[in-house]
Image: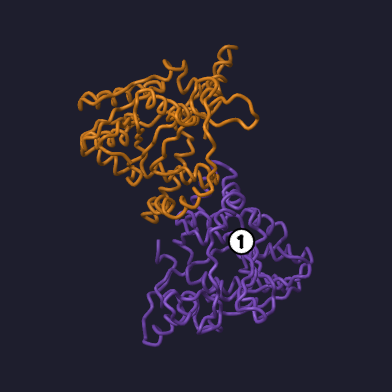
Chain colours: A purple, B orange
Amino acid sequence: MFGPDDRLLIAVSGGKDSLALWDILLELGYDVTGFYLDLGIGGYSTRSKEASMAFAEARDAKLIVRSLAEEHGFTVPELAGLTNRVPCSGCGLNKRYEFNRAALEEGFDILVTGHNLDDEVATLLGNVLHWNMDMLARQGPVLEERLMGNAPDARVALVRKVKPLVRVAERETAAYAVIRGIDYIVEECPMVEGNVQHRYKEALTMLEESSPGTKHQMYLGFLTKAAPRLRDGLDVSELVSCATCGAPTMAPEDGRDPVCSFCRLRSLAQRRRDVGFRPRPVTARRRR
Amino acid sequence: MFGPDDRLLIAVSGGKDSLALWDILLELGYDVTGFYLDLGIGGYSTRSKEASMAFAEARDAKLIVRSLAEEHGFTVPELAGLTNRVPCSGCGLNKRYEFNRAALEEGFDILVTGHNLDDEVATLLGNVLHWNMDMLARQGPVLEERLMGNAPDARVALVRKVKPLVRVAERETAAYAVIRGIDYIVEECPMVEGNVQHRYKEALTMLEESSPGTKHQMYLGFLTKAAPRLRDGLDVSELVSCATCGAPTMAPEDGRDPVCSFCRLRSLAQRRRDVGFRPRPVTARRRR
C-alpha cells in the first residue's frame, strides 16, 4: 500500500477507525498528516473536530483542517435541503472531492482512509444488490492513482487511495482505540438514520451472528475470486477536466462541456439559494 | 422455456409454489406430469404426499410417486443422522439426483420446479456471500441439458431444468393458491430450522421492507448485468458415468473411478449402518 518514504494524508473524522489508524501509522513511524473536513453538521461536527484536534495535539501530529462552508459556501445539511437529496449522498460526494483536492494541493502521494471490514462488506453488499458492475470492478483495498493529459504534461488527477483496515472488524478498531486510550467520538452522525449502508450492516450482522466469519468470507472471497474476473471487463474512460473547477471527471457523451458531479450539485444549490428557495428542513428522521 | 409439444415433469412438494405452478401449467394445457418424492420426514412427508395426491386426483392429473426409503433404503433424517450432515444438505442432493433420474427414466424432456423469486434471490445471496463462481455462472431460470458420451452414442445425462416462477414473489404464489382454492400444505418442513437459506431470506426480507423492490432488483440485475460476464469464464468439465450407479458426475482429478456425490453419501450411510453406528438424533433444534 505504501512505504516509509511516501507522504500520507489520512482522512480523519474523530471516530474510532480513523483515529486508531492514524495512531498506528504514527507509531510505525510513517510520514502521515491528518485531514479533517468540517461538514457543518452542528454540534456533531464541532465535537468531531475537537476530538481530531486534541488527538493531533497530544501526539504533536500535523493536521490540516478545512471547512466545507468556508471552501464552498454550503454545509452538508444545507446542500441536502437545497438539492432535496439524502444527506449521506451529497456528503460522500463532498468528501471524495475535498479529500482528493486537499491531497493534490498539499502534495501528498497517497490518501489513507479508515474504512474497516464492516464498511467494505456493506458497500460490497450494496454493489451486488444493484449489480453495479463498475463499482464492483473498482472496489478493493487500493485504488490506483489516475492521470490526466498526455505525456509530458500528464499529471495526477486522482490520488492513490488505500484502506489499510479492510480486514479489521469495527469491534476490533473500537477495542484498539479503547486499549490505546484514544478519545474518539462515540456518537454517530445525527443525519445517518435511514442510511442504506446502515441497513446493509444490520443485515450482514444478522448473518454474521448465525454464521461467524460471514463478513470476512464475503469480502475476502470477493477480492480473490470475483474481483479479478470483474476487473477484466472494466471500461476505464479517459478523465477530462471539469470546465468549472478543473477537477477530473468523465467526458459527457453528448459532447457538451464536462462538469463534475460536485460542481453540478453545488451549482444547483447555488441557483436555488439565489432565487430564495426555502429548503425542506433536513432532520435525522426525514427518511426511513 | 418450453413449448406445447414438450413433455414436462414438475417436481411437487405439496406446498404452494409447486402446486400453483402445476395448476397454471394444467390450465394452460401443457403436457405436465407431477413427481412427488417421499423424503420420509414423518408426518410432514405424509401430509405433503396427501396434498399432492389430492391435487392430482381432483384435476385428473398424472402423478408419479417415489419414496427415497424404497428406492435407496434411507429417509432424509436417517441419512442426516448417519452421515452427521445438516438434513437440508443431504435432502437437496437426494432431490437433485432423484428428480433427474425420474425424468430420464420416465422419458421427460424437461424438469420444471416451483422456485420463486424469494428462493432464487436467497440462493443468489448465498452464492455471493461465498463467491461460489461456478454456482453463480450456472444460476438462472433455465439450466440447459447436458449430454454424456460422444456422437452417435451421446445421450442426455442431465435433463433440462426450468423455473417459470423466478419473477414471482412467495406472497404472490401463496395468494394465487388461495384464490384458486388449492389445498396446499402450509406447514414448513420440521427440519428446516437453522437452514442457511432461511436466514438469507430473513436478511433479504429485512432489506426488502425498507427498500421495496430489492429482491427483484438483485435477481434481475444479476441476470442482465453479472451473469453473462460470469458465464464467460465458466469451466464446463466433461461429464462421466458414476462407477456405482451410472449417473453423470465429474471425473475425479486423481484418476480414480468416478463416484457421484449421491453414491458417496449413500455408501457412507450404509457402511455406518452396517457397523451398528448409532446416529445422533436429528431434530429441528439440532443446529442454530
Subunit that carries the residue with mark 1 = A
Image height check: is B17 above or below A103?
above
Q: Which residue is mark 1?
A: A115
Please provide percent x and percent y for residue A81. Answer: 41, 75
The residue at the point 63 percent across, 25 percent down is: B256
Q: Residues within 10 Å of mark 1 (few under 14, many from 20)?
A: many
Which residue extends farthest front?
A: B152
Image height check: is A32 above or below B108?
below
Image height check: is A156 above or below A134?
below
Closer to the camera in the image, A10 or A252: A252
Q: In the rendered picture of this protein, how many numbered marks are placed on residues?
A: 1
Please provide percent x and percent y for residue B24. Answer: 24, 37
Please provide percent x and percent y for residue A156. Answer: 64, 76
The residue at the point 78 percent across, 63 percent down is: A28
Image height check: is A129 above or below B38?
below
Q: Is residue A25 visible?
A: yes
As helix, strand or loop, the secondary structure at mark 1 comes to loop
Q: Is residue B88 visible?
A: no
Please provide percent x and percent y for residue B212. Answer: 36, 55
The residue type indicated by label 1 comes to: His
Quadrant housing the N terminus of chain B: top left
Which residue extends farthest bottom?
A: A274
